[in-house]
Amino acid sequence: MGIIAWIIIGLLAGAIAKALMPGRDPGGILVTMLIGIVGGLLGGFLGKVIFGVDSIDGFFDLSTWIAAIIGSVIVLALYRVIAGRGHRGHGVHA
């Protein structure tokens, strides 16, 4: 797959992950794309390690999208934990 395909998958997988895990996140569309791209790579790696399958075959393969979405949910959860540490205790609470 080319870089354009990875960006499209990243954008969509990151958006789906944010829809599955609603909440306020710092960052905009670029962070969503990066979460999706890293999530896709993580999902592909985990699929290969755990199940012994190549889960990132092509743009239109269902396994690619499932791996990207699952990986994106994991990366989003980690991102929230890490980003949440920096925001704790700051600001005025009513």
Image (tube, grey):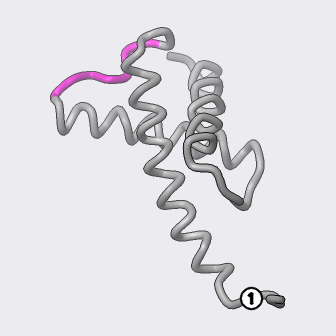
Residue at 54%, 70% (x, y): give it: 82
Say which of 72 and 93 sits in front: 93
Asked if residue 72 lies in the magenta stretch, the reply is no
Residue at 46%, 23% (x, y): give it: 65
Residue at 75%, 42% (x, y): give it: 29
Counting from the top left corner in percent of width and height, residue 20 is at 56, 42
The residue that label 1 is drawn on is 90
How many numbered markers are drawn? 1
Counting from the top left corner in percent of width and height, residue 7 is at 63, 28
Asked if residue 53 lies in the magenta stretch, the reply is yes
Residue at 50%, 13% (x, y): give it: 59
Establish if 22 lies above or below 92: above
**Quadrant showing the C terminus:** bottom right
Establish if 19 lies above or below 91: above
Locate residue 56: give its quadrant. Answer: top left
Stretch of the chain drawn in magenta: 52-58
Q: Residue furthest front?
A: 94
What is the three-letter code of the residue carrying label 1?
Answer: His
Locate residue 54: give its quadrant. Answer: top left
Say which of 22 and 67 sits in front: 22
Residue at disc 1, secondary structure: loop
What secondary structure predominates along the stretch shown in magenta?
loop
Establish if 52 lies above or below 62: below
Counting from the top left corner in percent of width and height, residue 38 is at 50, 43
Establish if 7 lies above or below 42: above
Is disc 1 surrounded by few (<14), some (14 to 19) or many (20+) residues within 10 Å?
few
Determine whether, in the image, residue 50 is placed left or right of residue 22: left
Counting from the top left corner in percent of width and height, residue 31 is at 68, 49
Determine whether, in the image, residue 34 is placed left or right of residue 45: right
Say which of 8 and 15 sits in front: 15
